[in-house]
Amino acid sequence: MVHSLIQRALAERRLSQIDCMLAEQIQPQGGLLGVFMAKAFRQGHCAVLFDEEMIDPFLASVFIDDQQRCADLDFLQQMRRSLEREWKAHAFASHQVVSIDDRYAAFPAVDAMEQRLAEEIVRLARAQPSLSLPPSLHHRLAQLSLSDEQYTAVVGMSRASLSCIAGGPGTGKTYLVGQFLAALCASFDQPLRIGLFAPTGRAVQTLVQSLERACFFEQDDIIESQTIHKAVRSSQEWLSYHCMIIDESSMIDSQLLLQFFQKIPSGTRVIMVGDPDQLPPIDPGKPFCDLLQSSKYLTSLYTAFLTTCHRTSSQDLQSFARAVRSRDLAALSSWTSSEEIRFIPYMPHEFSTFIREVTSMAVQSCDDLSRQIVLSPIRKGIFGTESLNHLLSEPSTQMEPIVISQNRYDFDVMNGDLGLLDKKGGLLCFQHQSIPSVLCPSFERAYALTVHKSQGSEFDHVVFVLPHRAIFDFRLLYTAVTRARKRLTIFGNSSGLVQAVSSREERVTRLVEKIQKLHVL
């Protein structure tokens, strides 16, 4: 029965071929356990936890369609018991899966990767900063125009080699870091080397622009910016900086952060900045969130949570984002349209007309790319990005927005970078360069993006398409909402919003536990 159910789930695209191929390696004789582990890993978990909170959503998503979900509780219990029997019998290929204890299991390579990452984190956090701070720095910090929580954070950053600064939009994370860097550089006679990093090229550009507005660097200081991927692939054995800033840290997966940290010398001052309530990385792990939890065990790691919003504009947007983040169902269900936030109810027959009217905007230069975007949580279907891009494309236009879909290190363009396709000139145009389109074939239209692809970017106007009866982690809606700087338009209704934030899925990792064990050694 299990085999036939798996085949049906595969045919109905509730399982992928990759899931089944990986499951066969885990459990050659077939069964539920291999599929469970394969799907969990592809969803970003570093381990699987044998409890109902993880098992039941997996079983329901794979084996029960929308019409059956409420009625088949007996079936779910039957499948759960079958999975439990396989788990207790250790029905998997021992060379592929390591059983950690009675409740956890993980792939050996992933478990070893998390162990190495924990060791790198402890190494960087425990190291004495190689750049000794002069007394004048603390005097400069005291003179900064900061709130009490910002001042507490900046003093904590000045004393630690590894810091994590967390907060939502408008809480002044970048401003705080910029003021600290300006005070740091002004406190030394010799020029300092400052490295600015982020997961995508777009996020790097945003970080640089934000820091330029927030602070003033001395002309002799060496300020270098690049994507984390480029830094990891650098031929340099070590990344030699006095201070390194890592923005959009919630987007960084565990493997990438391990590779990055391995290139940082002990004693380098490293400051990670991010919003832990945004979507987790696409690949396995959630190291930024795990780091924030680890400071209770690793006291040399400094963490700060900024909660006060300092933006005076877009008050409705900020309040709406807070309601989504706190999952305030009462507030969301009663929210009404305003100048900043507009709700457009479902009218299936008029959807195409509405979406065209709301998004009518010519794109002439790279500066226009930050004016407006359509976001969707899905790629397929009428409300998916593929259909939306087809609907919104204009064959007669010379310039068309595109998004890179694969890292191209030779051109320094990364997956998620936005640009323009010059159809007549045959060029892909970015803020920092233009390259022939035939040399970089891995790109897609970008009138509409998935919410994942939009991370690291902000837009004046965000149009979010909320598919009917959508159920997804609230972080996806929160990430979409916080991409908007001035206006937000939502295709959907208040009941759809409530349903959209009804789910909260926590990734299973072992990083915090591994850091805790290293700390007591």
Image (tube, rainbow, N blue to C red):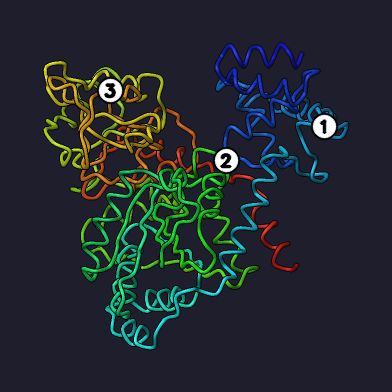
Crowding at mark 1 (Cα within 10 Å: few <14, some 14-19, many 20+): few
- The three-letter code of the residue at mark 2 reads Pro
Q: Residue at x 57, y 43 (%)?
A: 505
Question: What residue is shown with label 2?
Answer: 284
Question: What residue is shown with label 3?
Answer: 389
Q: Choose mark 2 or mark 3, whichever is in front.
A: 2
Q: As drawn, is 331 to the left or to the right of 215? A: right
Please say if 23 is above or below 148. Answer: above
Q: Residue 444: where, in percent of width, then height?
A: 31, 24
Q: Residue 511: where, in percent of width, then height?
A: 64, 53
115, 369: nearer the viewer: 115
Quarter location, residue 461:
top left
Kindly indicate whether the residue at mark 1 contacts the one at mark 2 (C-beta within 8 angstroms). Answer: no
Question: What residue is shown with label 1?
Answer: 94
Q: Secondary structure at mark 1?
A: loop
Q: Residue at x 78, y 29 (%)?
A: 83
